[in-house]
Amino acid sequence: MRVALAVTGSIAAYKAVLVARLLIKAGHEVIPMMTSSATRFVGPVTLSGICGKPVAIDMWDPDYPGELHVSIADRADAILVVPATADILARFAQGRADDLVTATVLCARGPVLVAPAMHPRMWAHPATQRNVAALGHVRFIGPVSGLVASGDHGMGRMAEPADIVAALLGASGDLAGKHVVVTAGPTYEAIDPVRFIGNRSSGKMGFSIAARAAARGARVTLVAGPVALATPSGVTRRDVESADEMRSALQSALADADALVMSAAVADFRPDAKSTTKIKKSDGAAPAIALTKNPDLIAEIGAARTGARPVLVAFALETGDDVAVVGYAKDKLTRKRVDIVVANAAHESLGQDANRVSLVDASGATPFVAASKDAIADLILDRVVAKL
């Protein structure tokens, strides 16, 4: 593989040298590029020495006859931006072409992958998040939560070089070029400003599916309910709380999706009315909370689907023995018009690092398999690949 490695101006720029070294060690060719700001953090001679070729910096390089950005984009199988600053993401989102890196990305013929690195407040800023949302054609590797250069802790630390290289090489996997949407975790349905109706889902299964889909080359959108889990490398995450919020997030995420894996434990019911103030014991007898049904998200999507896309995967988390659990799953397969149902028992799944499942589709049900959630994720994705 021939990789155009673009380094931008961040304190994390020194890690790009390690990325280049890992790629070359794995037998890939690296075409090095730097923004002028990047040269303030790491010397072009260092990157050139690792890559064995001159570093391209100036789009107007007089030594190069022709259009340098077009030439690099034509030669590169993939473009990898490490690190990607808030500024470069903003310029990518605007379609700018005011330096060599932005012009090359705008001219890319293959996948573009970016590894963001910035202070957590910069990553969380609404402007940055709007730019991330606008870059649906770009695959994100990280960021991750951890210590940043200032000593602060939060989401914004660049993914580690080995993880970046693994994500890039996974872009040639069996889900390369596909957009996989995954839901994970519970939903919380508010009773008052401090109380809610929820469930015990940890989100671990959905996060494993998202991580493995990204490792297999997919562009992954993870719609996550309230969970305390780090975002998998290379995954775009959207946090929601209620079933209605998850519904809204899915409406936009599914616009170009090839598959939806609906592993979230969406609450079946929500309070009919939410108190605007905390309900107090001193108010008298315990309140009667009237419930109303939440929308059945996967059933809505199945009913609205007009073709074979997206491939729909539902979960049947039930109590009971294996025969009963598979029976529920077969009923859900037909009733909700999905392609695959993952049948599992609640006591063997909730909060655990392993799972025991049967995969049910139109051809029948597989025997139950017990394995880690990462391994189960790959079994599910194998079936998705077959459907695609």
Image (cartoon, rainbow, N blue to C red):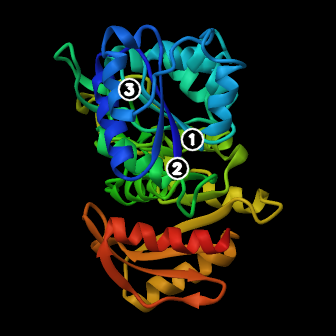
Judging depth in this view, the residue of 120 and 326 nearest the camera is 120
Left or right: residue 142 compared with residue 286: right
Task: Name the front one of labels 1 and 3.
Answer: 3
User: Which quadrant holds the C terminus?
Assistant: bottom right
* 10 Å crowding of disc 3: few (<14), some (14-19), many (20+): some
Left or right: residue 319 compared with residue 315: left
Left or right: residue 111 compared with residue 167: right
Residue in the image at 83% along x and 61% along y? 306
Residue in the image at 66% along x and 14% along y? 97
Q: How far is disc 1 from disc 3 in space, using C-alphas?
A: 19 Å
Tell me the residue that label 2 is attached to.
1
Tell me the residue that label 1 is attached to.
78
The image quarter containing residue 339 is bottom right
Residue in the image at 44% along x and 44% along y? 224
The disc, 1 or 2, on the residue closer to the chain's N-terminal end is: 2
Q: Where residue 198 is drawn, which disc sits there?
A: none
User: x, y (%) of residue 231?
Assistant: 37, 41
